Image (cartoon, helix red, strand yellow):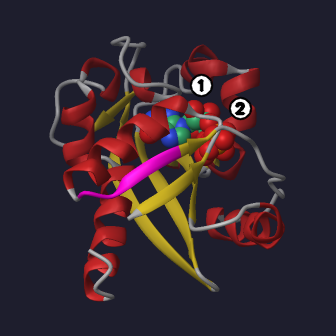
């Protein structure tokens, strides 16, 4: 089966297509944005986006909204992660966290799959801590400052396959794959 992944983020596309290729799902990259409302939950962003995309995109598609939630910052940047990455970057986050000993954080990914007339939503998360400095050049976005629980390296220091073994996005894709096999699509 073929699904279009609508995202402007090539890193997301690489991660999801690696996982889906292993399950013989072909992912096609549709490199375009869509309006993202400011709201308190990632899922609401996707559900709103889907109402517009349904009219504009033919065939099955997948969209991904993700965020980094830092506990000491009251879950910031959370739903504002894209804006904050653009405006403050990882250095800005490290400045906000300077002197903070409680560094717990988690990533969350929500995926929305449109198949026929149906919308299905899948969640994945990954707990960890905010590193003291940027480490590694792999991945994208916040990867160099996020160290998953039980690991000594940041996502930025891991290969795509290593990140895909434990990440929020990979977990959401696993739930998506379980759904596809339960509905006999695979
Ligand atoms: P699309 O909306 O076009 O898919 P985006 O990069 O704007 O791409 P998001 O709004 O979901 O995607 O991402 C919010 C921010 O969080 C953005 O700056 C990403 O780079 C970052 N981000 C998302 N997933 C991440 C991950 O797995 N590792 C590190 N940073 C991530």
- The answer to whether residue 72 is seen in the rendering is no
In the image, residue 26 lies in the stretch drawn in magenta? yes
Nearer to the camera, 51 or 68: 51
Determine which residue is flagged by label 1.
Answer: 93
Residue 82 on image: x %, y % = 68, 37
Q: Is residue 164 above or below residue 56?
A: above
Nearer to the camera, 170 or 3: 3
Residue 32 on image: x %, y % = 73, 41
| Point 84% across, 53% down: residue | 35
Magenta segment, prevailing SS (helix, strand or loop): strand
Helix, strand or loop at label 2? It is helix
Nearer to the camera, 59 or 155: 59
The magenta span reads 24-28
Determine which residue is flagged by label 2.
Answer: 84
Q: Rounded to the nearest whole Å, what is the CA distance between mark 2 and mark 1?
A: 9 Å
Helix, strand or loop at label 1? It is helix
């Amino acid at each position: 089966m073929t699904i279009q992944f609508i995202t402007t983020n090539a890193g997301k596309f690489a991660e999801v297509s690696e996982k889906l290729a292993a399950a013989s799902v072909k992912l096609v990259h549709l490199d375009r944005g869509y309006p993202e409302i400011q709201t308190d939950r990632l899922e609401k962003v996707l559900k709103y986006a889907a109402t517009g995309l349904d009219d504009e995109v033919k065939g099955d598609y997948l969209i991904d909204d993700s965020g980094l939630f830092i506990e000491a910052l009251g879950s910031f940047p959370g739903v504002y992660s894209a804006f904050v990455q653009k405006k403050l970057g990882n250095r800005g986050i490290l400045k906000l966290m300077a002197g903070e000993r409680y560094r717990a954080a988690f990533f969350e990914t929500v995926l929305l799959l449109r198949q026929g007339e149906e919308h299905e939503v899948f969640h994945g998360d990954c707990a960890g801590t905010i590193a003291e400095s940027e480490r590694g050049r792999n991945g994208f976005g916040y990867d160099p400052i996020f160290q998953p629980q039980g690991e000594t390296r940041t996502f930025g220091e891991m290969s795509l396959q290593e990140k895909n073994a434990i990440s929020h996005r990979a977990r959401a894709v696993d739930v998506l794959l379980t759904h596809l096999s339960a509905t006999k699509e695979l």
